[in-house]
Image (cartoon, grey):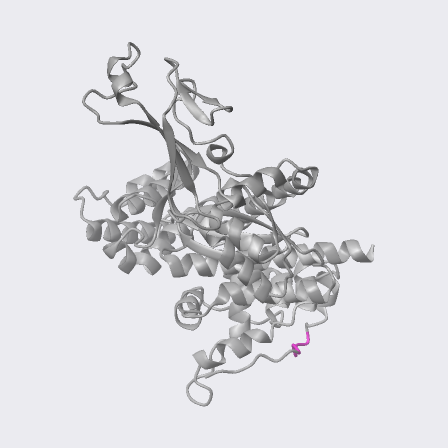
Amino acid sequence: MFKQQQTMVFSPYADLYDIIVPKDNMLRQINELVDFSFIYEELRGKYCLDNGRNAIDPLRMFKYLLLKAIFDLSDVDIVERSRYDLSFKYFLGMAPEESVIDPSSLTKFRKLRLKDMNLLDLLIGQTVALAIEKEILKSNTVIVDATHTKARYNQKSPLEILQDRAKKLRKAVYAMDESVKAKFPVKNTSGVLEDEIAYCQNLIHVIENESGIAQVPKILQPLHLLKETVADDVEQLRTSNDPDARVGHKSADSSFFGYKTHLAMSKERIVTAAIITTGEKPDGKQLQELIKKSQTAGVKVETIIGDTAYSEKDNLTYSKTHKMELVAKLNPQITQGARKKEDEFAFNKDAGLYVCKAGHMAMRKARTGKKGKGANQVDTYYFNVEICKRCPLKQGCYKEGAKSKTYSVSIKSNEHKEQMAFQESEDFKAKSKERYKIEAKNSELKHRHGYDVATSSGLLGIELQGAMAIFAVNLKRILKLSEETYE
C-alpha cells in the first residue's frame, strides 16, 4: 500500500543530525535544494492506494538509488553504509536508531516500480528547471557528444562471467588466508552453466560461514559482486549475456560492446538532454532529438557545439531552418573534396574541364544526382575513349574494353559551402573551444559515478543507471554553482 513518508523525524536522537551532519554536507545541501515530492506523484500509480501492507516509502527507495549513483556502491554496500553513516540516514529521512532495508528490496523497486517510467527525461527536466529557477542556467548554447558504456557482461559467455568473478573472489581470500583453500569446494570443470552456479553458491557459503574472514573489507566487494550476479541475474545468465548490447566503434581500430549515451549540455555544464541507445547507433542522428528534448526542458537553444559527427547535411539544414548556429566542423572528405586520383587529373579553369595526366582534355561534362535545394550532385567529365584506347599511360586509368572513360567530382551543397565559410571564422573557432567541457562531463560520469560499465543487463537497466548518474552530476553542479554565486 502506498504511504507517503513524514517530513519530520520523531526520535529522541534526532538532535544528533545537527551535531554530526554539518550545514555544508553535500547530502544535507541536496535535501535542502531539491523538492523530491515529484517522486510521489510519478510513482503513485505503481502502488495500491488502499489495500495491503504498507510499502517501503518510495521516496526513501529512490534516494537509496541516488546514493548508489553518487557514491558508486553496490546495493549491499549502500544499505550497509546507511546503517552507520548518519549523513546517509539524514538524507534518507530516517531516525538515527531506525533499521535499514533489505538490499533485495532495491532490486524489486527497480524492476517493479520504475519499469515503464521515462525516468531519464523526468530527472533531467527536474534539474534543468531547478537550474533555471536558481538563475544558474542562463546560456542559449548546448554542447553535444556521446559517451560509451561497456555492457556488464561484455562479450563473455555467462559461464565465463561466473568463473571470472569466482576467481577474483578466491584470489582476494588467498591474499588474506591461503589455508582456507582446503575448505573450498572442488572447482567446476563440466562446462555446464548450472554446475558453475552451484559451485559459486557453495563457494559463497564456505566464505561466509566457515572462513571467518567474510567481513574483511577487501573480501566484501568481490563477495558481494559474485552474490549479486548469482542471486539477481541467474535467470538472465541462463538466457543471454546481454540481449540489447551491441558493438560500437570509438575509432577505426577500436571498438566496445555495450551502449551509447548521447548528451546535450549547457555551457554551465548542466546536462539538458540525454538519449541512450545501443552501441552501434551513429552520434549525428541523435542531434535533432537532443535539441528538442533540451527545448522541452526549458532551454532556449541558439548555438549547438559538437564534433564532426554532427555536421551531416540533415543537421546543417535543421539548424539553419530553426535559426541556430551549428559549430561543428565538416568531415574532411567534404572540405577537401571527394575526388579520387587528384594527382592524375588537373582542372583547366579556362576551359572548365579536367585534363588527364597524358594531357588529354575531357570532351564534355554532365551533372548527375537529385536536383533541388540542399541536394548533393556530381559533375561527370567524359573523355574521348578512342584516344584512351591508344594512350601509352592507359595502364590503371582505362579499363580494357570499356566503352567510355569518365572522371567524377562531387559538388558541395549550399549547406556545405556555407558551413565551410563559417568554420573558418573567428566566431566559430572561439565557440568550438567550449567543446572540452562535455568531454570532462563524460569523464566525471564514468570515473566518479561508475558509468563506464553497466550495472545490469538490458537497455532498461542502462537507462535507469544513466538517469540516476546524470541526476547526481547535475545536482552536484547546481550546488557548486550556487556556492560560487553566494561567495
The one nearer the camera, 440 or 112, is 440
- Residue furthest to the bottom: 50
Q: Position of residue 256 (x, y in %)?
A: 39, 41
The one nearer the camera, 42 or 8, is 42
Q: Position of residue 126 (x, y in %)?
A: 60, 67
Judged left or right of residue 473, residue 23 is: right
Q: Position of residue 390 (x, y in %)?
A: 25, 13
Judged left or right of residue 160, residue 459 is: right
- Residue furthest to the right: 487
Determine the residue positioned at 39% across, 67% down. Answer: 111
- Residue furthest to the top: 392
Quarter of the image with the N terminus is: bottom left
Determine the residue positioned at 58% across, 75% down. Answer: 38
In magenta segment, residue 391? no
Mostly what secondary structure, the magenta segment? loop
Total label count?
0
The one nearer the camera, 56 or 109, is 109
Is residue 177 in sight in this rendering? no
Determine the residue positioned at 59% across, 63% down. Answer: 295
Quarter of the image with the C terminus is: bottom right
Q: Position of residue 459 (x, y in %)?
A: 38, 58
238 over 95 or under it: above or below: above
Judged left or right of residue 477, residue 170 is: left
Question: Hey, which quadrant is residue 26 in on the image?
Answer: bottom right
Determine the residue positioned at 69% across, 72% down. Answer: 14
Is residue 293 in sight in this rendering? yes
- Residue furthest to the left: 190
26 over 390 or under it: above or below: below
252 over 370 or under it: above or below: above
Q: Which residues are magenta?
A: 8-12
